[in-house]
Amino acid sequence: MLSIAHSPDADDIFMFYAIAFGWVDLPKAFSHHALDIETLNTQALQGVHDISAISFALYPLIAEQYALLRCAASFGQGYGPKLIRKVSTKLKKNFKVALSGRYTTNALLFRLYYPHARVVYQNFLEIEGAVLRGEVDAGVLIHESILDFHPDLVVEKELWEVWCELSSSELPLPLGGMVLRRSIPLIQAISLEKKLTQAIDLALEYSPLLSTMLLERGLVRVDAQKLSTYLKLYANASTLSPEQIEGLNTLFALGFKHGLYPAPLRASHQLIPTRYQSLRFS
């Protein structure tokens, strides 16, 4: 049985539940697990799941075990995670900050941009409260939290701005994607990627119906209006574009330049070689 893992944020739920609701049949029986992003990253390092959502910043550390999928990716384009603080707080050079996990993309960018900050890691659902209670000076909000937060909080810095400065570009900001275990036979891997892509295409085509089903079943943490807004940000493409591939290359090069990865990596070399199927059966 295949083990498929994704995060509980709205775009992952949206992209996956076309499969869970039976709109698309996978070629093999599966179990699915909704876990916070840092748990997903840690389990990917351990090789727990056959298919998993991860932070793109983690990928170079697991590239030998997992291939990148072209579908179910989240990028920011003029938006993304937000560094927030209380209105009354002035951040010092060594401010204490809560991040959603050591291996997240926002943590990579944050640590490069704010090297003197004191970092603690928390579940992303707990970060806003930690800032409000004064347990930390600031925190980076991700997922649906970026849409609506307490009025006592203000945005100190957009991580999109950090990305543009560090990368010297305005390429799409790579946040999270899906990976597939390399030990899965190639023909099966190609079929699985096609089925996952088909599920996302159906989810996008029937977005109002799927959104209603998710809301009625309490499967997302936001109301209908926020769900619509969030999906327009992150659930708007079923396959990687050339610009997104270049964004990934830039992220991997940035991490390698700062000694975070053992080797340089090109995203296009890590994708499943879909031409194999047509060549084999031609």
Image (cartoon, rainbow, N blue to C red):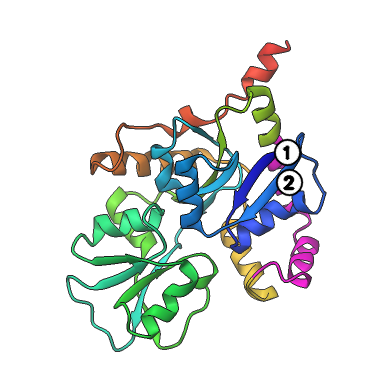
Residue range of the region highlighted in magenta in the rendering: 194-220
Q: Which residue appears at 56% of the width and 61% of the height?
A: 233
Rendered image quadrant of residue 275: top right
Work out whether residue 76 or residue 118 is closer to the camera in this orientation and state it.
Answer: 118
- Residue 208's label in the rendered image is none
Q: So how many labels did they put on this image?
A: 2
Whole-angstrom CA distance, mark 1 to mark 2, is 6 Å
- Relative to residue 100, is residue 134 depicted above or below? below
Give left or right: position of 234 versus 277. left
Q: Which residue appears at 59% of the width and 66% of the height?
A: 230
- Mark 2 Cα within 10 Å, few/some/many (few <14, many 20+)? many
Magenta-colored segment: predominant secondary structure: helix
- Mark 1 Cα within 10 Å, few/some/many (few <14, many 20+)? some
- Residue 199's label in the rendered image is 2
Give left or right: position of 5 versus 81. right
- Relative to residue 135, is residue 173 depicted above or below? above
Cβ atoms at labels 1 and 2 below 8 Å apart: yes
Amino acid on which disc 2 is placed: Ala
Location of the N terminus (image quadrant):
top right
Q: Which residue appears at 41% of the width and 54% of the height?
A: 104
Tag 1, which secondary structure? helix
- In this view of the protein, can residue 122 be seen by the observer? yes
Work out whether residue 90 or residue 38 is closer to the camera in this orientation and state it.
Answer: 38
Location of the C terminus (image quadrant):
top right
- Residue 195's label in the rendered image is 1
Question: Could you tell me residue 272's position as x and y percent?
Answer: 57, 28
Q: Which residue appears at 62% of the width and 63% of the height?
A: 10
Verify whether residue 116 appears in magenta.
no
Give left or right: position of 183 versus 133. right
- In this view of the protein, can residue 76 be seen by the observer? no
Verify whether residue 202 appears in magenta.
yes
